[in-house]
Image: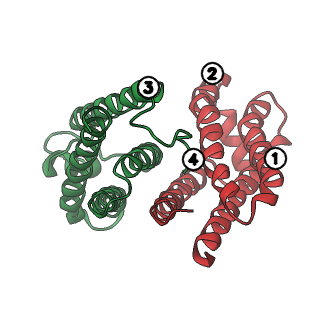
Chain colours: A red, B green
Amino acid sequence: MNSSYKSLILYFLTFNTLLLTSALLIYSTKIGFIPSEVVEYYSAKTIVGVLKVNLPHIFLFGLFGMVLLHFLIFTNYKNDLKKLSYTFFTSAFFELVSPLLIIGGLDLFAYVKIVSFIIFYFVIIYISILLLLDIVNN
Amino acid sequence: MKFLLVKDLKNDSYFKPIISALLIFTISYLVIDIFVKHNSIGITVSSLLNTFFGNEEEYIDPMELSIFLEFWHMDIFFIMMLLLTLSAIYIRLCKASKQSLFISNVNIISALVTLLSVAVSYFYISSFIYLYIFSFYLWHILSIYISLISLYKIYRE
């Protein structure tokens, strides 16, 4: 990997950290990590309201996943790419779909929402760490 | 960074108009972003302080935490994607010269400072608003410059 591109990836990871921080702050202040809080938050929402939030996220999760994961191809961790891609996109899918099911009356999906958010969050951190390690080691 | 699969951007007749369009759209985004910010949260010290902390004399309520966080979250994402793409094009067109790397680094660092200083000024120290305004203009001007230089490199050199 070219050194100028390495620095670009480092910047990307810094922005990524800010993005994760803001996402965590939004999630914790607006929704919460306790299932009852999640149910309470989405009970006051309509399907259209949730879809308005989901709509940009559907595309941006795809774009962000593609950008973040494609960097792994140029590292020594490319063997993990498939596994990480499946985890990333599956958790993103449940993160987006579970609120709709909660509104539909399936309160149990509050657990799915929390777990998928945590998995999604940590898979991004894990991929970022792998990229960072590759840059530092090479 | 393999967004751009074509190595020789300047001499690729298929890729040239695509990159040019992207750069023109980027310039448009940057200019409109200044106007939108001017009319929403403001881009002067007084307007930003009024937006963030409210003003009793002018009956302006302070900005809610959730609204600020959503604004910050969106700004981080758009700046990240914009600068990543723009820098990749610029560095490739300038063949990673020292000057291009310097400008690219200053641009990205000033954008990072913009994002950090706006959060610090909202949550902790309001005087960081000066740093926010300075870095906001700096990264916008540098990004427009980078876009224009890239367009020049594509067609003139």
Q: Which residue is mark 3?
A: B13
Q: Is residue A136 left or right of residue B81?
A: right
Q: Which residue is mark 1?
A: A86
Where residue A105 sits, quadrant-wise, is top right
Residues at discs 1 and 4 in contact (Cβ within 8 Å): no
Report how far apart the C-alphas of labels 1 and 2 lie in the structure. Answer: 28 Å
Are marks 1 and 4 in one subunit? Answer: no
Q: Is residue A12 left or right of residue B141?
A: right
For the residues carrying marks 2 and 3, which lies nearer the camera in this image? 3
Say which residue appears at 21% left-offset and 37% top-offset.
Answer: B38
> Callout 1, which amino acid?
Tyr
Report how far apart the C-alphas of labels 1 and 4 lie in the structure. Answer: 21 Å
Q: SS for tag 2?
A: helix
Chain under label 1?
A
Report how far apart the C-alphas of labels 4 and 3 lie in the structure. Answer: 19 Å
For the residues carrying marks 1 and 2, which lies nearer the camera in this image? 1
Say which residue appears at 78% left-offset and 40% top-offset.
Answer: A94
Residues at discs 2 and 3 in contact (Cβ within 8 Å): no
Q: Which label was assigned to residue A48? A: 2
